Structure formats: structure tokens, C-alpha cells
Image (cartoon, helix red, strand yellow):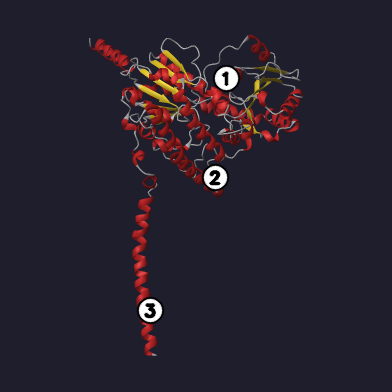
Amino acid sequence: MQLHLSLVTLLLGWVSATRAANILMILNVVSRSHHIWNSALITALAERGHNVTVLATLPVKNPGPNVTSLVLEGCYDFIHGQEEFDLESMSDTSPSEILNIMFDWTDRICDFTFKNKGMKTLLNYPDNFKFDLMIYEPTSGECLLGLTKRFGSPPVIGVSGFSHPHWIDYKFGNPNNPSYIPDVMLPYSDHMTFSERMHNFIFNLWTDHLWHSKLLPSIDATTRKHLGPSAAIPSEELLKVSAVMVNTHPSFDSPRPLLPSVVNVAGIHVKEPKPLPKDLQEYLDNAKEGVVFFSLGSNLQSKNLKEEKRQAIMSAFAELPEKVLWKWEADTLPGQPKNVKVGKWLPQTDILAHPNVRLFITHSGLLSTLESIHRGVPMLGIPFFADQKINIEKSMRYGVGLRLDYDDITKESLLKAIRTVLDDPSYAKNMRELSSKFRDRPETPLETAVFWCEYVMRHKGAPHLRSAAKDLYLFQYLLLDVIAFVTAATLVPVLLLCYCCKKIFSKKSVRKIKKN
């Protein structure tokens, strides 16, 4: 009888822990790769029985019965139409300029999102409709935190496919010491020189200033404009966010302190490889000499490369004994070498899992980098903007990749870089070791992500995870007020003593002079 009662209790506890919840995911980052990254979590939550409403820049692919897909139509045309949106030219743009552009895009996307048909559909939900959890992307979704009050003030979780930028630390009160934690936009290691530490520190301060003086006031104003004065204020709602899941892992990123509410889920989107289309499968199977896979991701497109660079790349590929698989977004590739196969869309993670793929030439976006690490394929990185430079720099430090700047691409430089990685067995060896460390976890990153989503709901926002650091001003957090007090308490008596001694000795000197 006691055994039966225990089983019933266990079953009831399981049902309670996994009851169907209404979850709102707001994903307004204009990036197909980020959408793929988040889609894994959407599917996993829906498979757990939760009802997931997704407001995103792209429709959810093959949504199940538990998924409602609302699309922010026109976001890609809107961003690509911006004057600054020339990703190819950003290869030599400074980190501060790129960050300025990113924050500016965030503000514009915020305004565009509220005007969008998909957003209006969401806002037309019944007034009494409530969500049990809201998930947003900290990369550009802060303005959408203004929706919390509209839907019953649910607990909120951030899901960042963009690594672990330091402004996330600031929002969550997570420790961030610029002496050994480089900013995600800077190509530094955790062992920085004095000048690098100085640059990193100043860049952190400048970013915080830009965040608070420019971006937050702007998105607060945009939210009030579209949702009215009674809407939740994003800058205030940020302080209430329960947790954030970041796309990092200590095997590849420098070890750093993390609060319990900051969770590593790097590689959340990488699944067991699926069967490839027949033509790709045969092409890779028959490439006994190996395959070089070339893709610049979802935002950069090879078809838009400068003519001189395209010719240099093709000339280099034509001299390789290996076969080449190239993500080329146009119908034809003029002058296509015989050993090159092109495709407008290629299943990247599944291709990287094929044993004949020996090198991945990539733009070094974080998602592509982590896919390559998971599959164990060495990289040749051609970084353009954002965190791509630090990603390939880290790959070089681990001995799993090589960097070639876009401006330096010639037939000779590309051939030399390819042969360096292919002909030196240390790259493949180091990558196998790194891949093993990256995959060695007690549970999959997707299982970790699902657990924390449900944990926050079970514990009504998990306020016990909230760091008191959120309530401190920066000068308090850094103990500048305490340091100032201790300094004053130490110096004032010393200065008074010096002053008194000076007065005493000066009087004695005067008396001595008068006496003489």
C-alpha cells in the first residue's frame, strides 16, 4: 500500500511540474541563424506539452499543434534597407562603431516591431489573457519587456544566442571583472596586456554609458509611444528578469564567475545529424580526398562578395585536390571550378557531421563556430563584424582554427591558409579534444534550457535567485563610496598631523629668527 501511495505521489508531482503552461517567446533579432537557435527551444517546450506563442522575424518551421507562430513581416527588408547595413564593409570597422550601429538598429527595430501586423495580432488577444512565462532575446528585445503588464506580468527569461556580452552581466548583477574578462566585441584573451586591459576597461565603461544614456531612454520612450503611459517600462522590467541563458561554455570561453540565474546553454540548437539530401550525400561520400565546406552564414551572402575576392576564392579552390562545397545564394556561379559544388541553402550542422568534411571556411559567427566545435571540424575564419573576430581569435588560441582577414584574401593567401590547416594534423587533433570537452555535460544544453524555463515557472519567477547587486548603483557595486571613505578616514588624520607639525615648526622657526 505504501509503495502505491509513493508512486501516486510521484506521478502527481510529475504532472504538476510539467503542467501545460502558456509561454510567449518574443524573438525580434533580425538573424536567420538566431531564429534557428531559438527554434530548438520552441520545439522542446511544445513537446513538453506547453502552449508556445512565438512572435518572431521568421515563421516557425513546421509548428506543431502547441505552437502559434506570429510573424514580424518585413523586418529583413527593413534592416537590409538601412544605410549602414553593409556587412562586407564592416570587416575593418572599429568595435565602438559596430556597437553604435547595433544599438541604433535595436532602437529602429523596436519601433518597427510595435508597428508590425504580427505585434498588432498579439495585442488583440483578449484583455484577460495571461502568459505563465515570457522569453525574450537580450540582444535587441528589451523594448518588448513593455508587454509584461499587458499579459499578467509573467516571469521573464532572457535567451541570448549572442554569446555573453557584458551588458547582460550588468543587467543581472553578475560579476564582470575587465582585468581578465574581455568584452565580446574585442579580440582579446583572458590574459591581457596592460594596454589591452586599459582598452577593455574603457570600452566597458563606454558601452555602459551608451546603454544607459542612449538606448534605454530611447526604448522606454518608444514603448510609451506605442503602448501608452500605463505600459511597463523596459528599463524597470529589466531589474525583474528571472534568469538568462547564454550561448557560452567554459571549454571554449574563458572561465568566469556566473550567478545561478545565468546559465550556459551553448550549442542548444545542435542535434543528432539528419540524413542529407541524396545529391549531397553522394557528393560527400565520394570525396575520398576530403571536402572543404565554405559558408558565410545567414546574414552575409557569398553572392555579394566583391568580384576580385570571388575570383581569388575560385582560383584557389580550383587548385585544391579536395572537393569544395560552397553556400552560394545565386542560381549560377560564373566560372565555377569542376571540383566545386554550390547550393543556395545547405544543412550546415548535418554537413559538418560527415566524416569526409575536413575544413570549414566560415565567417566565424558564434553559432557556426559552436557547430564546428561540436562536430569536430577545424576552421578557417574570415571575420567581418560583431563577435566574429574574438571567436576566431579564441579558435586560434586553442589551435583549432586560423584567421584570414577579408581584405587580405588573394589566391595565394587563401591557398596557403587552407593548406596550413589541412596539412598540419595538430588542428584536427586539437579540435577532437575541444569537441570532446564541449560535448561532455551531464545533460544536453537543450535539456538544461527546458529545465530552467520550467524551474522559473514552478517557483513563480524564482526571486530567490535574484542578486542584490541589481539594487546597487555602480559606485556602490564597485565599493567606490567605501574606498573614498576609507581613503578619507586615513588621509584626513595624516593631513591634520602634517598641518599641525608644519604650524609648530614654522612658529619655532619664527621665534628662532626673532631671537637671533
Q: Residues within 10 Å of mark 3 (few under 14, many from 20)?
A: few
Where 510 sits versus 194, above or below? below
Q: Residue at x 37, y 58 (%)?
A: 487
Quadrant of the drawing holding the C terminus: bottom left
Q: Residue 237 carries which label?
A: none
Apparent side of residue 480 relative to residue 28 in the rendered image (left or right): left
Q: Which residue lies furthest to the left in this view?
A: 1
Q: Which of 102 and 8 is in front in this view?
A: 102
Tag 1 secondary structure: helix
* Residue type beneath disc 1: Thr
- In this orientation, does residue 83 appear? yes
Secondary structure beneath disc 2? loop
**Amino acid type, mark 3:** Ser
- The tag on residue 506 is 3
Tell me the distance, in whole angstroms, between the alpha carbons under discs 3 and 1: 82 Å
**Amino acid type, mark 2:** Met
Residue that carries the numbered disc 1 in the rendered image: 349
State the SS at label 3: helix
Who's the residue at 44% across and 25% down the image? 114
Say which residue label 2 marks.
192
Expressed as whole percent of the image width and height from the top left, the position of residue 354 reads 62, 17
446 or 512, which lies in front?
512
